Image: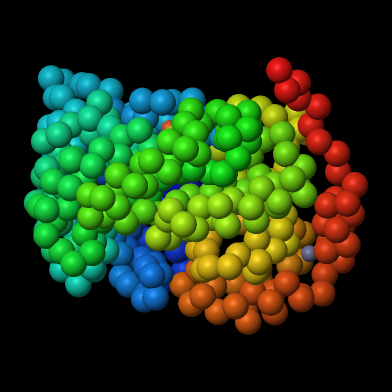
Amino acid sequence: MNAHPSAFTGQMSSVSSNQMGKKTSVKEDVIKPLAVWEGSDRIQESVVDTLTIILKSNGCSWNGCRMCSYRHERYTPTEGQNVTEHMLAQMLYVAQNYDYTNRPVIKIYTSGSFFDKQEVPEQVRKEVAKQFEGKTLIVESRAEYADAEIISDFCETLNSDDPLYVAIGLESSSDVIRDRSIHKGFSFDEYKEATKRVHKAGARVKTYLLQKPAFLTEQEALTDMHRSIVDIMPYTDLISLNPCTVQKNTELERLWKQGSYRPPYLWSVLDVLIKAPVHVSCDPLGGGKRRGASNCSVCSKTIVDGIYDYSLTSDRELLHSLAEIPCDCKELWEFVLAEERSYNMPLA
Ligand code: SF4
Ligand SMILES: [Zn+2]
């Protein structure tokens, strides 16, 4: 669901971490998670040390979003081992190889939905809660799997003051954009109902927004993010902005290769962050590269680094100073905003 590095690069053998994180390589031929890395995140008003674990699971049951390659990452049973044993072995590897005693927040991604029983067997879910008792966990789930009873039991076992954030990839508050540009398969109303169930179960909600999925102009994508942030504020505790990346083996990659898609400009990403009424974190994965949000080769790196810093510090002055960097490509971006016309997709 979220933008994790292995899917973007198409390599499962190594990952990069955020600015404060440590790089860790994980080979595929023994039972280990797809990737594990240490880093830092801003949660509410604090910067905390985190451990991020990407587990190989049964894979996303929806398996249908136009821009997503995570859905290709799924466990294929081998040599008599079932997925439960395989996932428990990955958890054991983490316990034996990482000291997370002083890391209060653990992020677990499964390339799908943690609360989907078809994807993550119940026994694994229970083991995760036991292993990380006392911690704050962040896991991802599609709206339909956010079951109040399951989440409530999970929080009870975690037994911490702030046990759980359920991260939901809503992507946009517009049902038309979510359906046509992403093919996400659930509505804004279903998301709202899911957030109520999560809160009722004693957990919090983190919401991912996706800036510039397929078929939108730069300006349409910008307007969509401005509106989506305001629309979701009553329902979510944290917001994370993902500038869309071109992942391998996706429909979006096909559009990109035929010249029908360009990831968002970093100027647009800055504009969204600056105008957001609340702090919105942002991980511009692949930023400055052809497959990620980018401006020109002169200014992209400075802006990407600045956005990472902003995500941790929430320093609005930094955002304003980045937006004021003089660069020739800003004029091009302004021209694109003014002149680009919509993709001619039939409405019905
Ligand atoms: S719900 Fe969509 S974005 Fe999330 S893992 Fe499944 S296919 Fe990918
Ligand atoms: Zn530039």
If the image is split into quadrants, where does the N terminus sit?
top left
Q: Quadrant of residue 142?
A: top left
Q: Quadrant of ligand 2?
A: bottom right
Residue 348 located left or right of residue 120? right
If the image is split into quadrants, where does the C terminus sit?
top right
Position in image of residue 206 (x %, y %): 40, 54
Q: Is residue 347 visible?
A: yes
Position in image of residue 66 (x %, y %): 57, 30
Q: Is residue 81 above or below residue 211?
A: above
Q: Residue at x 82, y 69 (%)?
A: 327
Q: How is the image coloured?
A: rainbow
Q: Residue at x 71, y 58 (%)?
A: 268
Q: Quadrant of residue 37?
A: bottom left
Q: Residue at x 15, y 34 (%)?
A: 122
Q: Is residue 100 visible?
A: no
Residue 289 located left or right of residue 236? right
Given residues 267 and 237, the one toward you in this image is 237
Position in image of residue 65 (x %, y %): 52, 30
Given residues 135 and 71, the one toward you in this image is 135
Given residues 74 and 346, the one toward you in this image is 346
Position in image of residue 238 (x %, y %): 43, 60
Residue 227 located left or right of residue 143? right
Hey, which residue is sitting farthest bottom in the picture?
Answer: 317
Given residues 113 and 14, the one toward you in this image is 113
Q: Residue at x 77, y 42 (%)?
A: 217
